[in-house]
Amino acid sequence: MQFYTLDLASLIKAGDYEGIKALVISKIPLVIAALVIILIGFLISDLIGKLVVKALKKKKADPSIHAFIRTIVVSILRLIFILSAFSTLGVNINSFVAALAAGGVTAGLGLQSSISQFASGVQILLNHPFRSGDFIDIGTVSGNVREIRLMYTVLVTLDNRRVIVPNSNITSANLINYTAEKLRRIDLVYAISYEADIEKAKQVLREVAKNNELIREKPEPVIAVCEHGTSSINLACQVWCSPSDYWKVFYYMQESVKVEFDKGGVAIPYNQLDVHIIPDKK
């Protein structure tokens, strides 16, 4: 950028000190105007930055991005006001803007993957399809959300493995959030023999479910015949619990139903195969 370099240089070369003095004095109002633009611009930028943070809080966006988004907004606005101030002074900023745009395009092409990750991170933090502590499944991996960053999300699997997932993988996948709702249904199936008393088996399942305080009474458990299998009558047992209690209830039901079926004489059949031996005909 040239700040009246050509005029000033000509005056200095000519030794015209009166001209130099007049030139400097003539530019003082413009310098003051430029400083005022920068000062007011910085104040406006800070105000808008605070409004942006307020809007993010109202939208309940993740607090970890508040400062980051505010910094970006304030920096862009300040750059605009600084360029406006230089323009007021008569500085040609077109070449600077063109160079900045060209540099932005070049950087964008080189950082395309990173930009995609960043945009996905912002989308997750603004829309919050899940939060820290939720148990999610994105098809290739599932686990509890440990941490949400702008570029990636940290999951901890059920066997305590730490998995770093790029945010673009999450936003492009079908995501299942198992803990987003207050209740979760457990779908179980128990097989009994064709000779067993169906009503007695259903009563056993009701009692087992009733004896666990983690299983909700509302909605009521659903227990019904769901299939006539090749070797058994299959009973569906659907119970509701808190998402955090899912596996406790699941393991409880699997063990307790077997114990109570044995006590009540409800037979659980093995797979059966009838073999017919045909004698050779001579």
Image (tube, rainbow, N blue to C red):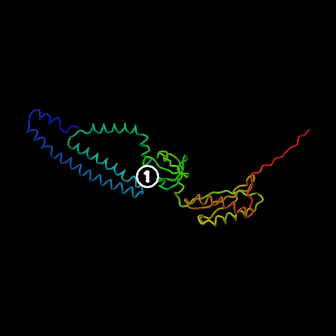
Residue count near mark 1 (Cα–Cα under 10 Å), binned few <14, some 14–19, many ≥20: many
* Left or right: 232 as drawn, with respect to 166: right
Residue depicted at 44% across the width and 40% down the height: 113
Image position of 112 with respect to 38: above or below: above
Q: Is mark 1 on a helix, strand or loop?
A: helix
Question: 245 or 40, which is in the foreground?
Answer: 245
* Total number of numbered discs in the rendering: 1
Question: 258 or 15, which is in the foreground?
Answer: 258
Q: Which residue sits furthest front?
A: 160
Residue at mark 1:
125
Residue depicted at 59% across the width and 64% down the height: 214
Q: Which residue sits furthest right?
A: 282
* Left or right: 140 as drawn, with respect to 25: right
Image position of 1 with respect to 265: above or below: above
The quadrant of the picture occupied by the C terminus is top right
In the rendering, at what x and y percent does residue 98 appear?
30, 37
Question: 65 or 219, which is in the foreground?
Answer: 65
In the rendering, at what x and y percent does residue 30 appear?
17, 45
In the rendering, at what x and y percent does residue 271 appear?
74, 51
* Left or right: 196 as drawn, with respect to 129: right
Residue depicted at 42% across the width and 55% down the height: 62
Q: Which amino acid does label 1 sit on?
A: Leu
The quadrant of the picture occupied by the N terminus is top left
Q: Which residue sits furthest top?
A: 13
Question: 70 or 160, which is in the foreground?
Answer: 160
* Left or right: 8 as drawn, with respect to 190: left
In the rendering, at what x and y percent does residue 245 appear?
57, 60
